Image: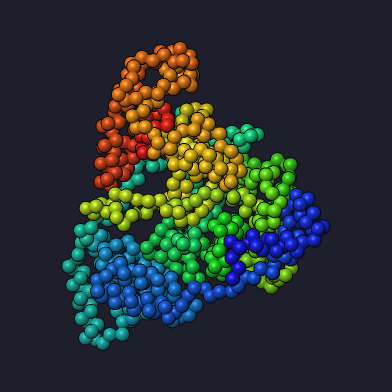
């Protein structure tokens, strides 16, 4: 089985087979389509091995039996795991498979009912009905379960409707007269003796501080107080139009494309990236899941109807997440979309094209042109690396051909002009994604963190990657201005320090000054992003967090236009200091008085966090950061711990 991680070996073999004329031609060409043409005949020999679709009726039946055993034994979590596995594995291409799937989902809903997860019960009943193969003789059971849920939630109207449906469905229950009469009496008794849930089912309201106001008329994912500047050396980057406070959401952006990693493909929704313990199975493959019927329908009406057949090949080949995204940028659009843009884009596929990029009036993440013109550092790229990327692009093109993206009766050994155009786009995507993709992560509970029933510690886990065209415009600093996190696939960016009008707003590409030394940081950034970092922490060689002196305080000169900083120690300082740079006398006491507020705020914030009151804790942490940046200067250990 070919591994994408072994592509270097295949590249070397391809290079060896190239004639001197072909090598010269590859080196000299500035056109992506020419690179594809030169490499296609060598790359088409890489095998695309067929594999099964991940469905298995026998394993699904076994999972149902195991789940039933766990359910009878009151082991609800184990039962749910078994039913989930069976739902994912169950084929949907036969009546027997569809019936088994419907029963598995119904059994899962019964388990959720036992856990008083009533909204999940409703979702599963909708799922069962959408399958359409649940045995008619059992239909009264799901209506009865739905009625009990409405009773528990004290919704008399919908409960009455569900009880009526349960009674009317008994005509299909294949019961004799005596049993039928008894069952009707039981249902009527349940209707009279309602059981109200004692569990809190209220939805937590969203805090006003979590609402993104946006308002940017040009960059729709950005805050109104951000604009994007340009410099020949720095490229495009973000600046503040006006002062921006700590904790303000300045970007909320949906991805141009997002892909879940193989390790999380049965845990997180392939469409919205949210984690789910109630998976909706793909009807045709057992390699991805969805969190809702809506997500499943949207994915299968666009990219997954193409990727479904090749998903196992991609996984087993060892394809990187960037390869999957480069493919997704094509598969999420119909073939006709790119044919319409072919004339417009063809000239830009020249590697050294001097034409000015086409700029849309409104910068949107779902606009392909926005993604197409992101930085790819083409002037720095080595020709040998382009051989590697060309091989990957051709392999991904062949997967699209195999999946039917170009229609039926496509020949693998022939490269048409249309296919060459798409492969050229994929080649460009791979270069763009190298510098512009962002990881998608989610906060997950840690097993050891539950104390007295409260969740106190969490960790951020990588689950996939996405392309966020607005966020991709931000430049790097080892001391960033922002923090980013995901809600599903949606990227949210907040300020973690006050930003003055006109200041550059920095994000962080990986290495922080607090955890990695300057030489290692610079080497890391040079290797990954092809630039040498000259941010303030790098130039001034700020210490690692572990080497910071907690008793040391840096205070700025009272003259706001002066860059000078005083280094003080908590037990040894003078009330007045004269600046060596501008000769201004600075009073130290106001700064110390301001910083003294932290002794009250931080313990309160820690207590709120430990009790699970995260919104209130965050307010105090942001207030503390404002105080730190107002009265002191970085590097400061308290600034890092508050972030």
As drawn, 285 above or below 337: below
Q: Position of residue 590 (x, y in %)?
A: 33, 20
Q: What is the basis of the colouring in this image?
A: rainbow
Determine the residue positioned at 26% across, 87% down.
176
- Residue 136 pos. (x, y %): 36, 79
What is the count of numbered marks? 0
Quadrant housing residue 66: bottom left
Quadrant for the N terminus, please.
bottom right
Q: From this viewpoint, which residue is outermost toward the right?
A: 21
Residue positioned 37% across, 23% down in the render: 568
On the rendered structure, is 29 left or right of 126? right
Whether residue 133 is visible here, answered yes or no, is: no
Q: Residue 182: name its quadrant.
A: bottom left
Image vertical order of residue 12 relative to residue 443, above or below: below
Q: Residue at x 62, y 45 (%)?
A: 374
| Residue toward you, 334 or 522 | 522
Towards the viewer: 459 or 16? 16
Task: Kindly identify the residue that appears in the image at 27 percent across and 42 percent down.
Answer: 608
């Amino acid at each position: 089985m070919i591994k994408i991680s072994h592509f270097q070996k295949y590249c070397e073999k391809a290079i060896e087979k190239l004639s001197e004329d072909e090598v010269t031609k590859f080196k000299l060409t500035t056109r992506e389509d020419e690179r594809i043409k030169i490499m296609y005949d060598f790359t088409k020999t890489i095998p695309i091995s067929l594999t099964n679709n991940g469905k298995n009726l026998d394993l699904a039946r076994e999972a149902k039996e195991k789940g039933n055993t766990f359910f009878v034994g009151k082991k609800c979590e184990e039962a749910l795991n078994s039913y989930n596995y069976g739902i994912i594995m169950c084929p949907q291409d036969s009546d027997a498979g569809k019936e088994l799937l419907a029963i598995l989902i119904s059994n899962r809903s019964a388990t959720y009912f036992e856990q008083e997860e009533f909204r999940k019960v409703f979702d599963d009943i909708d799922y069962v009905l959408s399958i359409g193969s649940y045995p008619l003789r059992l239909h009264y059971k799901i209506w009865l379960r739905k009625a009990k849920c409405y009773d528990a939630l004290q919704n008399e109207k919908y409960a009455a409707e569900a009880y009526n449906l349960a009674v009317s469905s008994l005509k299909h229950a294949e019961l004799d007269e005596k049993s039928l009469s008894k069952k009707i009496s039981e249902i009527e008794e349940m209707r009279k003796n309602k059981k109200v849930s004692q569990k809190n089912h209220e939805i937590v309201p969203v805090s006003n501080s979590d609402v993104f106001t946006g308002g940017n008329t040009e960059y729709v994912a950005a805050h109104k107080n951000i604009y994007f500047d340009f410099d020949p050396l720095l490229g495009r980057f973000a600046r503040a139009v006006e002062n921006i406070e700590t904790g303000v959401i300045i970007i909320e952006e949906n991805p141009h494309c997002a892909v879940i990693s193989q390790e999380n493909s049965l845990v997180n929704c392939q469409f919205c990236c949210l984690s789910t313990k109630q998976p909706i199975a793909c009807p045709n493959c057992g390699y991805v899941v969805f969190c809702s019927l809506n997500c499943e329908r949207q994915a299968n009406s666009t990219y997954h109807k193409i990727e479904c057949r090749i998903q196992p090949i991609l996984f087993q080949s060892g394809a990187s997440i960037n390869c999957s995204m480069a493919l997704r940028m094509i598969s999420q659009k119909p073939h006709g979309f790119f044919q319409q843009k072919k004339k417009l884009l063809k000239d830009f596929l020249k590697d050294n094209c001097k034409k000015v990029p086409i700029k849309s009036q409104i910068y949107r993440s779902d606009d392909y042109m926005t993604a197409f013109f992101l930085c790819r550092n083409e002037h720095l790229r080595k020709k040998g690396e382009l051989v590697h990327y060309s091989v990957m692009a051709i392999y991904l093109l062949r997967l699209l051909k195999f999946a039917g993206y170009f229609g039926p009766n496509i020949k693998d050994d022939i490269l048409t002009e249309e296919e060459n155009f798409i492969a050229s786009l994929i080649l460009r995507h791979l270069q763009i994604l190298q510098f512009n993709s962002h990881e998608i992560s989610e906060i997950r509970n840690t097993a050891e963190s539950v104390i007295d029933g409260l969740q106190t510690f969490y960790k951020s886990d990588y689950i996939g990657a996405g392309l966020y065209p607005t966020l991709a415009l931000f430049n790097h600093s080892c001391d960033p201005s922002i923090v980013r996190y995901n809600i599903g696939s949606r990227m949210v960016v907040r300020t973690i320090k006050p930003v003055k009008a006109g200041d550059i707003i920095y994000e962080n590409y990986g290495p922080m000054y607090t955890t990695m030394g300057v030489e290692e940081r610079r080497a890391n950034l040079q290797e990954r992003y092809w630039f040498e970092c000259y941010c303030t922490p790098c130039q001034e060689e700020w210490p690692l967090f572990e080497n910071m002196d907690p008793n040391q305080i840096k205070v700025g000169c009272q003259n706001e236009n002066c860059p000078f900083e005083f280094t003080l120690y908590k037990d040894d300082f003078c009330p007045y200091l004269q600046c060596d740079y501008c000769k201004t006398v600075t009073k130290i006491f106001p700064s110390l008085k301001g910083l003294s507020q932290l002794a009250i705020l931080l313990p309160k914030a820690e207590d709120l966090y430990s009790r699970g009151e995260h919104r209130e804790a965050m307010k105090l942490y942001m207030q503390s950061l404002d105080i730190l940046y107002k009265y002191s200067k970085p590097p400061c250990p308290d600034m890092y711990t508050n972030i």
